[in-house]
Image (cartoon, rainbow, N blue to C red):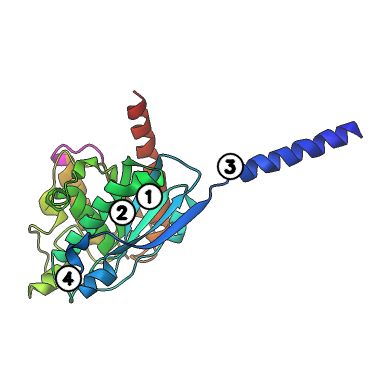
Amino acid sequence: MIKALFISVTLLFTIQLIGQNETTFKEVLDVSYYANSIDTDEYAKSRCKLDIRYPENIKEFNTVVWFHGGGLKNGNKYFPEALMNADLCIISVNYRLSPKVKAPTYIEDAAAAVAWVFNNIESYGGNSDKIFISGHSAGGYLALMLGLDKQWLNNFNVDADNIAGMISLSGQTATHFTVREERGLPKFKTIVDELAPLYRVRENAPPLILITGDRNIDLAGRYEENLYLERLMKTTGHTQTQLFEIQGFGHGGMHNPGIKLLIKEVDKVSEKIDNTLKN
């Protein structure tokens, strides 16, 4: 009888501990990331917003700023389901879209959103040393532009080198095809100019994770563009560039398995940051 009572009490205590250790999340939606400078622009007021999903009982958490895809023409902010399984903060960003705006407005919006995160994440319990930028397709392109071309974040007094890592899921590394269309250029004529991540290769960029779908079924040339960026980054001396190809998945299908890989890489980089801060 005493043994049975001991087991029952132990089991109850264990269940209580498990309940105490479960991560709880809070969501804050439709936060404007610009100051009053765009109040007269109704389209900007409606689009330039972000959503936050952060763990309430974890401090110094990792943050992933997530940019949606849609060819810079479509799409809306969302919390990727596969990313919601991780104990981290997700900040999902809307930005203005073509043809209502043209390049580089959507890059400027993305930079404003990331700057907002750097300036505000610690008030939610996060750590500004552990801010990662990521996205799928057009969102991956935006993440690459912000991390490789320092001018965009410099405009908001943020140093791109302070980004913990860039993770691009099937992002374009040449000048985006929507930018080409806006300029009257053929959509599928490869251009590498000042609005191409490939044009902004640099040695001292943050850690770079490139993830694509299967080269045979992802968008034409997407794997090859990312392979070229990987080679150029390593050639210039950037030792923290990695390229992953997810076999058997196309452009849309690689989204969820790509995010699972993203989570693993974020954890690895975050552990290195924690060890550096301790030392």
Residue range corresponding to the magenta coloring: 235-240
Q: Is label 1 in contact with label 3 (beta carbons under 8 Å)?
A: no
Count residues near mark 3 (Cα–Cα under 10 Å), then give few for <14, some for 14-19, many for 20+.
few
Count residues near mark 1 (Cα–Cα under 10 Å), then give few for <14, some for 14-19, many for 20+.
many
Count residues near mark 2 (Cα–Cα under 10 Å), then give few for <14, some for 14-19, many for 20+.
many
Q: Position of residue 200 (x, y in %)?
A: 12, 50
Q: Is label 3 in contact with label 2 (beta carbons under 8 Å)?
A: no
| Nearest to the observer: residue 160 or residue 45 | 45
Q: Is label 1 in contact with label 2 (beta carbons under 8 Å)?
A: yes
| Nearest to the observer: residue 241 or residue 43 | 43
Mark 4 or 3: in front is 3
Q: Main secondary structure of the magenta part?
A: loop
Q: Can residue 147 be found in the magenta stretch?
A: no
Where the N terminus falls, by quadrant?
Answer: top right
Query: Could you tell which of marks 1 and 2 lies nearer the N-terminus?
Result: 2
Q: CA distance from mark 1 to mark 3?
A: 24 Å
Secondary structure, mark 1, is: helix
Q: Position of residue 42 (x, y in %)?
A: 22, 74
* Residue kind at label 3, given as amino acid type: Asn
Q: What's the residue at 14%, 50% (across, down)? A: 149
Q: Position of residue 35 (x, y in %)?
A: 22, 59
Residue 158 visible in rendering = yes
Q: Find disc 3 in the rendering and name its residue.
A: 21
Query: Could you tell which of marks 4 and 3 lies nearer the N-terminus?
Result: 3
Q: Position of residue 161 (x, y in %)?
A: 20, 41
Secondary structure, mark 4, is: helix
Q: CA distance from mark 4 to mark 1?
A: 26 Å
Q: Find disc 1 in the rendering and name its residue.
A: 262
Q: Find disc 4 in the rendering and name its residue.
A: 178
Q: Is residue 203 left or right of residue 88?
A: left
Mark 1 or 2: in front is 2
* Residue kind at label 2, given as amino acid type: Ser
